[in-house]
């Protein structure tokens, strides 16, 4: 069964080609966003702030169509500092906060010819506290977090490119839940200067778009790297089907989706092998919690000390737990992480990419949680490029499968993701 | 000839012990700072802002004497965000900037029982543009940069502990020029959350104090790590005397100081061997420039785009040069850096530390430059812990020698620095 898309998503690549060909103006692309926003934002609640009029003025600038993003509208998770929009980090502590400078990624988007149209909802300080945003595929379900608004805005066709961040699973998981392409590049491929810190060894900027070619196009345009995969058909990859020790935590539908994708990729010419990860990587998985909790408690120490009453009790509890982690446990976790990176590099030496779930299943019903990032934590810690491949469904909601590449081989990860996306395109019932 | 100390420096460790023993109060320690500030600040110009009255109130708090720093005054380079002090990053663009939160290191100092007394002069965005601060040993000389005010404040006895940052050589070089102990820990030992970004692969928080035991005490207190070296006498280290390809750029006095320190350490029982670095590390040295320039231009892209007329022309030129670096050259430099770390780890496998100059010589006369960080760039890129060992002189001004440890072995670096400091203590004429 195909994912029932709540709206027609906007393909960044198609829009950019339309502008390049003179068939479309940046302003016209913006009006497509404005229409979707008018139709859906009241229900979806993807944005914290929008300035379509300012975006209209920016979209009229003459030089945009010669730049890689060609004047396309872009939205930023509200933990990216912006001088032109209030920036609240999902917290009442920062009500009315207006940074003096843009985050570097925001400037890079502008240099690439992108037009910022607004800020998207983040969970409180990019934590696990659920926000007000709804899943465009079913308003009774979470869109995932913490990059909730960015994913929902893509899924609802409100914007062709949006930025988020991942510390545990905040790019890949919501992308899976919302049925969009999500790309968490190798650690630090995209600068985090001017993005509110959560966990400095983990925080990674990521990009959302409709499909794999779109997210690769946007990431390539913004970073100036050769990441576009819309040229020649990617070579058939050698895929390591990796169930990990968490496999039984995945829903039957998700396990089926991964197996189906593997078979489809194989049928399309890919070599697919089973890979059992070295047991040491289970320790690395456990180390991710220690590093995240220790660092988050330090990153938000000022807010905790001075404004505790304005922090959600669930986040307060997490911070208190993080403050109790000893420096020895933290340093040990860092050591495990470094060893884990070497172990993973060796384990992946004979494969191009890993195929594994993006999340335990489809987006949970209700708003008690933003879902579980268990299928993302290890890869974030390893700094590996991760791609959520959209296009499958449990019959009701999207199911995302994940391609994990080798550190620094982002292009290969995107190529393999495209290969798998195409392989499953004719075969999305699971 | 012994360094002529412009003022008696305040030993953080002795002050802390005095407070612990009930011989001194935090308030009394603060008044020692206030006296030195009253006597010297007009000439030295170490601070951008001071609030001694607020510090006096904080120093009276009852719980301080039970905490590791025991109420000692601490100063922060003005690129650390502070909610209680204006934070200007050395730039008129940020006149009147008052961050909403403290940098994490500032909170950690407070949690450790330190009392912030003010912000110290930084060069403009921690660049090479000379600031107004003078060298307390001779007001006609630069104190070095970019942590100019923090080093000068320690040298002039104005404060027992101060924080800085190093991207090329901004901790070790000014520490050498000012004759103070400087500790640039392993990359990320001290969090940089809330510190203005310059170059994200290089920026490292560092600590200044009077002597090696003081800087180790302060770094241990703030990070909660076992870094104090004032207990038992450190074991005699195996020292690699490393002249590097830049050796002939060092002044005769500096080369003599390093050789003298090596002989003194040997006489005190250390094993000293000559180490010629693998030639590949010359490429790594060259890569440091590429990474720093590329990243700095992106970190300050907003300021450059919107406020170019308020940026010093020399910094503008550096930013423009950084903007021209291609992504391929940058990625290649990152690859060289990764390989360099492995090569250096292998080269150091049989040694505890490297001994090498901290700077080309003593502080240059005049204020045209803040001196050259050539003897620091490689180690910063390698993420290695570096310590400036004070106590030598060219007869007029201090000469600093540098101990470089293995990544993550910060305590061993501090122990070796203490060993060398003690070895040369009776033997400081060069």
Image (cartoon, coloured by chain):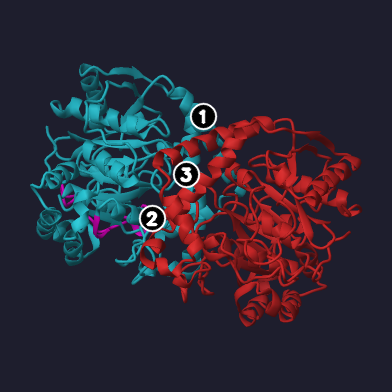
Chain colours: A red, B cyan
Q: Which residue is mark 1?
A: B342
Magenta highlight range: B115-141
For the image shown, how many numbered marks are present on the structure?
3
Q: Position of residue B26 (x, y in %)?
A: 15, 54
Q: Which of the pair B138/B275 is nearer the observer?
A: B275
Q: Is residue B174 visible to the viewer in this orientation of the structure?
A: no
Q: Closer to the observer: label 2 or label 3?
A: 2
Residue B126 included in the magenta stretch of the image: yes
Badges 2 and 3, same chain: yes
What is the quadrant of residue B64 in the picture?
bottom left
Q: Earlier in the sequence, mark 3 or mark 1?
A: 3
Q: Which residue is mark 3?
A: B289
The residue at the point 36 percent across, 70 percent down is B97
Left or right relative to B48: residue A183: right
Q: Which residue is mark 2?
A: B104
Q: Is residue A298 visible to the viewer in this orientation of the structure?
A: yes
């Amino acid at each position: 069964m195909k994912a029932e898309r709540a709206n027609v998503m906007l393909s960044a690549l198609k829009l950019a080609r339309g502008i390049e060909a003179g068939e479309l103006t940046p302003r016209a692309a913006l009006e497509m966003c404005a229409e979707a926003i008018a139709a859906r934002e009241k229900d979806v609640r993807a944005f914290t702030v929008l300035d379509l009029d300012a975006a209209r003025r920016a979209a009229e600038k003459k030089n945009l169509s010669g730049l890689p993003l060609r004047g396309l509208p872009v939205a930023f998770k509200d933990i990216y500092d912006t001088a032109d929009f209030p920036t609240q980090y999902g917290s009442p502590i920062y009500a009315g906060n207006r940074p003096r400078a843009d985050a570097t990624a925001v400037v890079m988007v502008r240099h690439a010819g992108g037009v910022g149209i607004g800020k998207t909802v983040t969970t409180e300080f990019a934590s696990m506290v659920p926000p007000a945003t709804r899943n465009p595929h079913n308003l009774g379900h979470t869109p995932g977090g913490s990059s909730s608004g960015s994913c929902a805005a893509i899924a609802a066709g409100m914007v062709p490119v949006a930025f988020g961040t991942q510390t545990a699973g905040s790019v890949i998981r919501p992308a899976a839940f919302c049925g969009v392409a999500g790309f968490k590049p190798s650690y630090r491929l995209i600068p985090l200067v001017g993005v509110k810190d959560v966990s400095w060894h983990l925080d990674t900027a990521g990009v959302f778009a409709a499909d794999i070619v779109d997210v690769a196009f946007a990431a390539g345009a913004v970073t100036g790297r050769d990441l576009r995969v819309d040229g020649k058909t990617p070579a058939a990859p050698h895929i390591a089907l990796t169930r990990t020790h968490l496999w039984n935590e995945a829903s039957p539908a998700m396990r089926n989706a991964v197996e189906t994708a593997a078979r489809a990729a194989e049928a399309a010419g890919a070599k697919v092998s089973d890979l059992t990860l070295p047991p040491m990587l289970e320790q690395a998985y456990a180390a991710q919690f220690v590093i995240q909790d220790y660092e988050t408690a330090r990153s938000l120490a000022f807010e905790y000390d001075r404004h505790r009453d304005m922090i959600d009790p669930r986040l307060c509890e997490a911070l208190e737990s993080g403050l109790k982690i000893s420096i020895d446990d933290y340093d040990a976790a860092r050591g495990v992480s470094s060893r884990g990176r070497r172990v993973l590099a060796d384990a992946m030496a004979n494969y191009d990419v890993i195929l594994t779930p993006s999340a335990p299943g489809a987006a949970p019903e209700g708003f008690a949680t933003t879902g579980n990032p268990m299928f993302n934590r290890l890869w974030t810690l390893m700094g590996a490029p991760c791609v959520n491949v959209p296009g499958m469904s449990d019959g009701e909601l999207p199911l995302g499968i994940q391609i994990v590449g080798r550190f620094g081989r982002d292009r290969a990860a995107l190529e393999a993701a495209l290969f798998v996306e195409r392989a499953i395109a004719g075969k999305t019932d699971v």
